[in-house]
Amino acid sequence: MSRRRRRGRGRRIPTGLLLLAGLLGSAWWVYRIENSPAKLDASLLLAPQTATIRQPEAESTTVPTPPPTPTPSIATPSAPVVEEKQSPAARAAALLAAGREALQRNDELTARTNLSAALQLGVDGPDEEFLRTELARLGRETVLSARIINGDPLVDRYVIQTGDVLAKIAAANKVSPDLLALVNGIVDKHRIREGQTIKIVKGPFRAVLSKRTYTLDIYLGETLVRHFKVGLGADDSTPTGEWRVATKLMNPTYYPPRGGEIIAADDPKNPLGERWIGLVGIAGAAVDQERYGIHGTNEPDSIGKSVSMGCIRLHNEDVEALYSYLVESHSTVIVRD
């Protein structure tokens, strides 16, 4: 019995040793925590942070409004501002002043509109000469050149289509193919290119002749665009009234209306020059008259005088230009005293 008791006591671990081992273990863990390079913040141990997850924003279904498209600056002619109760002379003076102001600010379309209206109301002396000269300049630069001002009601742009010919385009606009060729610098009227952009003039042209001043004004609508000096019939033999352009001839042969020698085309003695524009009377004293016309001359000194047999004559270079403006059946000529 005494041996068994000894063996049993030898297997037990003394309680003191267990307590000592526990103290040593706790001290070791405290030492590890206090001296660890990755020491944790106590607040993290007490209240661990949670990551904030940002939910993706829903796509906006609102379509963004595009920025406004800039409107091109269009130079539109301003309407003449005059009092209707004014006399024609006062209205003409107001329009003339407005036209001069527009010229100073380089507003060509407004100047052209106001000056044309002033001329039609009637002005005399230096103002009349100024109007015709300035309007002819504006007409050459805004209508009878390749230049196009946005908003000009007298002209437009046109893109050549398959099958187009210049004569067809001209006929649709009641102008001559010669004019469109001249304005656009087209050398051969029979050769135009598909896709080519050209300037078109919105016809027809009309002419107004003043026997008092020996002037022939060319209008497009109500706007004067050219101005020529003319010669008239002796003894007031050029009938007043309205005429329509009936025929046009280049290098015409001269057949004297009262008999005599027939003069061939290109003969220096031919009094018609190089162009003939035949007229037929449709109103006033011109009604049913058919033997009158507009032509060139081999006597340039006769311009500004009354020496012909009744026809209207121009310098040869002027009648060539006029020939390109007027068209058969559409253009008219008004002759006034």
Image: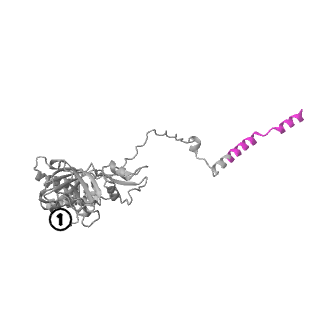
| In this rendering, position of residue 195 left or right of residue 18 | left
| In this rendering, position of residue 183 left or right of residue 235 | right
62 or 138: which is nearer to us?
A: 138
Residue at point 23%, 52% (across, down) = 279
Determine the image quadrant of residue 102: bottom left
| In this rendering, position of residue 131 left or right of residue 42 | left
239 or 206: which is nearer to us?
A: 239
Q: Position of residue 184 (x, y in %)?
A: 35, 58
The answer to whether one can see residue 260 in this image is yes
Q: Report the amino acid beneath label 1.
A: Ser
- Residue 42 painted magenta: no
Q: Position of residue 206 (x, y in %)?
A: 23, 52
| In this rendering, position of residue 156 left or right of residue 129 | right
The answer to whether one can see residue 146 in this image is no
**Quadrant holding the C terminus:** bottom left
Residue at point 31%, 56% (across, down) = 179
**Quadrant holding the N terminus:** top right
Chief secondary structure of the magenta span?
helix
314 or 7: which is nearer to us?
A: 314
Q: Position of residue 250 (x, y in %)?
A: 30, 59
Element assignment for label 1: helix
Q: Position of residue 208 (x, y in %)?
A: 19, 54
Range of residues picked out in magenta? 1-28
What residue is disc 1 on? Answer: 302
Determine the image quadrant of residue 227: bottom left
Determine the image quadrant of residue 177: bottom left
126 or 64: which is nearer to us?
A: 126
